[in-house]
Image: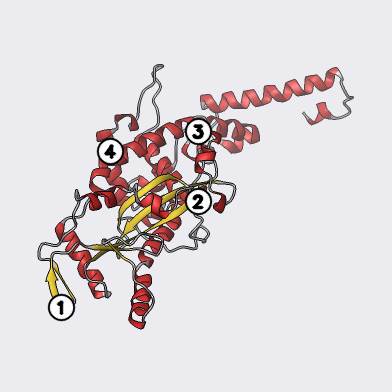
Amino acid sequence: MDAIFDGLLEDSDEEIAAVQVCIAAVQAAGQAATEGNSTSGDQERGWAGRFVGSKRKSARGVCAWFDLYLSPSPTYTSAHFLTLFRVPLRLYRALERELPLVAATIRKQTDCTGRLGHPLYENLLCSLRRLGNGASFQDLDDQARMSPESQRKIFLVFLKAVRTRFGPRYLNREPTVAELQGISDGNAARGFPACVRSFDCMKLHWKNCPRALKGQFHNPKEGKLAVISCEAVTDGDLYCWHWFAGRPGNNNDKTVLVNSPPFMDSLSGRRRMLLSDGYVLDGSRGQWLLYFLGDGAYPRWAIFYLPDATTKKEKYAAAQQVAVRKDVERLFGCQQGCWGILETFGMSNVGRRRGSGPRFTPR
């Protein structure tokens, strides 16, 4: 080949012949690699054999996540799995066992041409990777070996399956009497007996809001981007008892509150949070409603504790109340630090970049 290339003229017949010889050499090396005639592997085939062999291997579309994290002898430990996918390995095993019961399409399927689809572990890990790292569908196609459209479809199936299977047990449920008693005792040790939880609202900038909804979700105070209002209720252990999201950003905290299901149920009498033996307040025991800790942006209802900072005692109580209410702010920070998908929106009221907030293991 070197002799052919020496002394060639531009646009000559010899140059065309040299290119044809190169193409024939690459094709011959690829055919030898496919048939397995070579005994010494890539060293005997040369660069052409290595190129064709790598292309042939990548065309299989096999995801390497199983060998790296889920095999009997994985390359990485469960700590690396938690760092990358944001869930413990035992929680992933529970998802792998429970989600196919409510969504059969999340398993390995066969299309109309008879080709097998992606396995269960690949569908789950791809969805968890997007939730934990906030990656787009185009960012994961080279690792998951799935097209962006397949990732989008399986991601929606994954979200619906999680909500169907675990939503009634963990999402926006009413605590039992024993759980209320435990939360009340924990807050009593912090100076607020009969207090159940803290609540607050936050704003999420919706960067990729559709044009048809931008006018509805636009809030001039938050800039030019669309804004989504979210409301959360948590206890001292950062267990999120209530999550109410999706309200337009032009709603303030009071407007979100009057549309919140648990508070409307409490005011209408459909949900009454009471302890079996009541609780002691100012030396007397009674069957009073348990209360929440809020800030000054909320109305002065009986279920909210909003102290006036006028006297010395009230100023001290207000300072202690602000300290206890940091639970819900910690929840917002932990959500941002753990679930990178919220970074695609951008938490406006947290004010911390991803990675700077505290880490926690989801319960």
Among numbered discs 2 and 3, the one appearing first in the sequence? 3
Which of the two discs, 2 and 4, labels the residue nearer the N terminus? 4
Q: Position of residue 282 (x, y in %)?
A: 19, 77
Q: Is residue 224 above or below residue 54?
A: below
Q: How would you rate the neighbour count of disc 3 (Cα within 10 Å): few for under 14, some for 14-19, many for 20 or more?
A: some
Is residue 14 something one can see in this rendering?
Answer: yes
Residue in the image at 51% along x and 41% along y: 136
Give whichever of discs 1 and 2 has the lower sequence position.
Answer: 1
Answer yes or no: do the residues labelled 1 and 4 have beta carbons within 8 Å?
Answer: no
Q: In the structure shown, which secondary structural element does the residue marked by tag 1 occupy?
A: loop
Give the alpha-carbon distance from disc 3 to disc 4, as whole Å: 24 Å
In front: mark 3 or mark 4?
A: 4
Give left or right: position of 49 versus 341: right
The label number, if any, that marks residue 129 in the structure image: none
Residue beneath disc 3: 148
Give the Cα separation between the discs numbered 1 and 4.
46 Å
Q: Which residue is mark 4?
A: 164
Question: Disc 1 versus disc 3: distance between alpha carbons?
Answer: 63 Å
Q: Quadrant of residue 289?
A: bottom left
User: Pointer 2: what residue?
Assistant: 343
| Residue nearer the viewer, 238 or 13 | 238
Q: Position of residue 169 (x, y in %)?
A: 23, 47
Q: Nearer the viewer, residue 94 or 221?
A: 221
